[in-house]
């Protein structure tokens, strides 16, 4: 049997007769979304408005709220642009109701969103893989710097050189450093606390009770820093998941808007027309 195709349908511009999914429009929208997101993210990094910024001001919660709102703005703007491009470029299938056309426009927006997310994830994974050595080295250096700070807090004297103890040997400092690295949240065992107290007391000429208080104080600070890092990690994970959901909804809605403008032949040239 030979399939017959209406020649008049082929003559009409903008009709997709070969495939229900218009991949060129999807890819074009995903590229636009990625480009807008890249530009906005670069700008936010330049001004330090990212959740990974080392902000230590008096109102950190306000900073993270501002960073979260900025991230949502980036997601909404980028996928709104990509979704609109996808909807405007998608070729409408002949003899399909307006309701079905709206649904297919929205689905194309979701596919565009999925393509952008998958490609972004692949590129991020590739970047992490190629920079694994550098990243691992940076993390190790960061952990070493932080542990050195805790070790300094434990082993420093009281500032009076006349009352100084015998000092701390390199071997002892190495042992204390390992204890700090093995217990980043300050959860020292009873034996470890006793050892640290003895080291501090014998090396800094502090009374054993003062040395014990110092161990408790540093362990409390370590626990507070670990809890803060955990909260930031949970916040970033939740914000990432929420923004991905917002991105999907934005892509769906923007693609439908682009489809309506396509069907209504809406002229937007006045937005870019140069005044003479």
Image (cartoon, grey):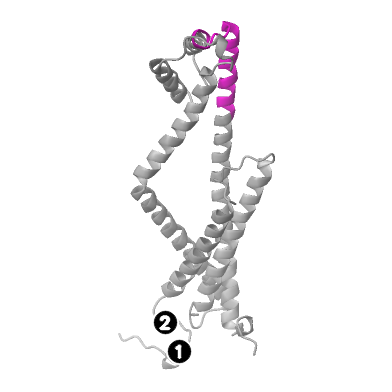
Residue 248, above or below 49:
below
Direction from residue 112 to residue 210 in the image, left or right:
right
Which dot marks residue 44?
Answer: none
State whether residue 59 is above or below residue 22.
above
**What residue lies at 42% left-to-right and 72% top-to-bottom?**
23
Q: Quadrant of the C terminus?
A: bottom right
Foreground: 150 or 222?
150
For disc 1, the marked residue is 9
Residue at the front extreme? 162
The local crowd at label 1, few if under 14, some if 14 to 19, many if 20 or more residues have their Cα within 10 Å, is some
Q: 212 left or right of 171?
A: right
Q: Where is residue 114 drawn, in percent x and y? A: 47, 60
In the image shown, does 44 or 14 lie closer to the viewer? 44
- For residue 103, say whether it is visible: no
Please provide percent x and percent y for residue 120.
44, 57
Q: Reading the chain from its start, which is encountered first: label 1 or label 2? A: 1
What is the residue that sits farthest to the left in this orientation? Answer: 1
The spot of residue 224 in percent (x, y) is 59, 28
Q: Name the residue under label 2.
A: 17
In the picture, measured across the screen, residue 229 lies left or right of residue 133, that is: right
Q: Does the magenta stretch include residue 199?
A: no
Element assignment for label 1 = helix
Label 2: how many Cα within 10 Å (few below 14, some 14–19, many 20+): few
Q: Which residue is drawn at 57% across and 54% down?
A: 243
Label 1 – label 2 distance at C-alpha: 8 Å
- Position of residue 13 relative to residue 176, above or below, is below
Q: Do the residues labelled 1 and 2 touch (CB within 8 Å)?
A: yes
Q: Is residue 221 magenta?
A: yes
* Magenta segment: 201-224
Q: Is the magenta stretch mostly helix, strand or loop?
A: helix
């Amino acid at each position: 049997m030979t399939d017959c195709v209406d020649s008049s349908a082929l003559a009409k511009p903008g009709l997709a007769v070969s495939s229900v999914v218009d991949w060129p429009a999807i890819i074009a929208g995903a590229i636009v979304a990625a480009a807008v997101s890249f530009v906005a993210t670069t700008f936010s990094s330049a001004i330090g408005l990212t959740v990974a910024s080392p902000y230590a001001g008096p109102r950190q919660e306000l900073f993270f709220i501002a960073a979260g709102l900025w991230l949502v703005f980036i997601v909404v703007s980028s996928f709104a642009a990509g979704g609109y491009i996808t909807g405007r470029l998608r070729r409408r299938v002949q003899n399909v109701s307006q309701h079905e056309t709206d649904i297919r426009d929205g689905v194309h927006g979701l596919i565009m969103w999925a393509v952008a997310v998958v490609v972004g994830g692949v590129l991020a994974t590739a970047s992490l893989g190629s920079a694994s050595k550098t990243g691992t080295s940076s993390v190790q250096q960061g952990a070493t710097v932080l542990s050195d700070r805790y070790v300094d807090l434990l082993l420093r004297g009281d500032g009076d050189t006349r009352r100084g103890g015998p000092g701390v040997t390199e071997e002892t400092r190495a042992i204390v450093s390992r204890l700090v690295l093995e217990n980043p949240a300050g959860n020292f065992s009873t034996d470890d606390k006793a050892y640290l107290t003895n080291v501090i007391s014998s090396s800094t000429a502090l009374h054993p009770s003062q040395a014990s208080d110092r161990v408790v104080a540093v362990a409390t600070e370590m626990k507070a820093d670990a809890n803060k890092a955990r909260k930031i990690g949970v916040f970033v994970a939740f914000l990432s998941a929420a923004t991905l959901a917002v991105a999907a909804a934005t892509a769906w809605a923007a693609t439908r808007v682009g489809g309506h403008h396509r069907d209504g032949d809406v002229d937007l040239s006045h937005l870019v027309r140069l005044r003479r």
